Amino acid sequence: MNLREFLNYRTHCLTCGSELSTIFHSRKRQKHKSMNNRLLVQMDLKSLKKGQKQYKLGYSIDYDTNDFCIEFFDNEGSHYDSRGVPLFLLKRFKNLDKNQGKYHIIRDCHSCGKYWYSSNSFDLDYKSANLGDLSVHDEFGVMFENHNDGYRAYKLHTFYNKKESTLYSLNITKKHYETMCSKNAAPPFSNNLITTYAIPFKKSPNEIIEKLSTLITFS
């Protein structure tokens, strides 16, 4: 997948229908912009010493080719030309990059917190300046269906690389369901765990719930 295909794999939350947000590598505060067919992810490039001037780091990724480059900005947003980046900023980024480990991209629902999917892990290869092919590594969702006088909650986590899924289920009251929805909280799942073959997240939540309900019934 290129970046555009990965971001369009799913654009809205399966649980609440809200538009998904993009997270590059970590949940640190970051801003995203689309510029010249590229995604620009900006975040603070802080110094370990207090009182020093703050700068911003930008990961600029081509939507179609996955080519990337690193950009630097001062705190007012002015962009440094590639030949004019101060050496101390390059050293600061090098230390940050070393501590980051492998990178990944997450698509997450900030509205309800009950759905996300994540890319495969990748290194930033500065020789090729390309992320390589992206894929959906794993996918997670919490879904509900009417059950008796209350609801049944399902928590499904599918690992496509391992070709397996873990599934939890829990029966909850209507009041408990309403509380969770108002507070964007997840149900307190117990150890009612099923590990099974990979269950793909289909387009319709009803299709997924029907599959999960059948698994729970015959497990």
Image: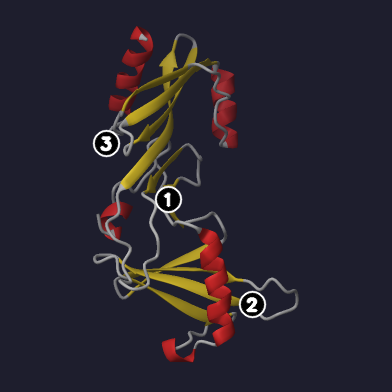
Quadrant of res 147 = top left
Looking at the rendered structure, the kind of residue marked 1 is: Ile
Residue 105 higher or lower than 56, as above or below: above
Mark 1 vs mark 2: which is more N-terminal?
A: 2
Of circles 3 and 1, the one toward us is: 1
Q: Secondary structure at mark 3?
A: loop
Q: Pointer 1: what residue?
A: 106
Mark number, residue 171: none
Q: Secondary structure at mark 1?
A: strand
The way the protein has been coloured in the rendering is secondary structure
Residue at 31% in and 37% down? 160
206 versus 42 height, above or below: above
Residue 58 lies, in percent from the top left, at 47, 72
* Picture coordinates of residue 85, whole percent (x, y): 50, 87
Q: Nearer the viewer, residue 20 or 191?
A: 191
| Kind of residue sitting beneath label 2 | Gln
Residue 138's place in the image compared with 2, above or below, is above
Q: Judge left or right: residue 103 versus residue 198.
A: right
Dividing the picture into quadrants, the one containing residue 167 is top left
Distance from disc 2 to disc 3, alpha carbons, whole Å, reads 44 Å
Q: In the rendered image, which quarter contains the N terminus?
A: bottom left
Q: Residues within 10 Å of mark 1 (few under 14, many from 20)?
A: many
Any mark on residue 54, and which?
2
Q: Which mark is residue 203?
A: 3
Q: Is residue 194 above or below residue 38?
A: above
Q: Residue at x 34, y 15 (%)?
A: 215
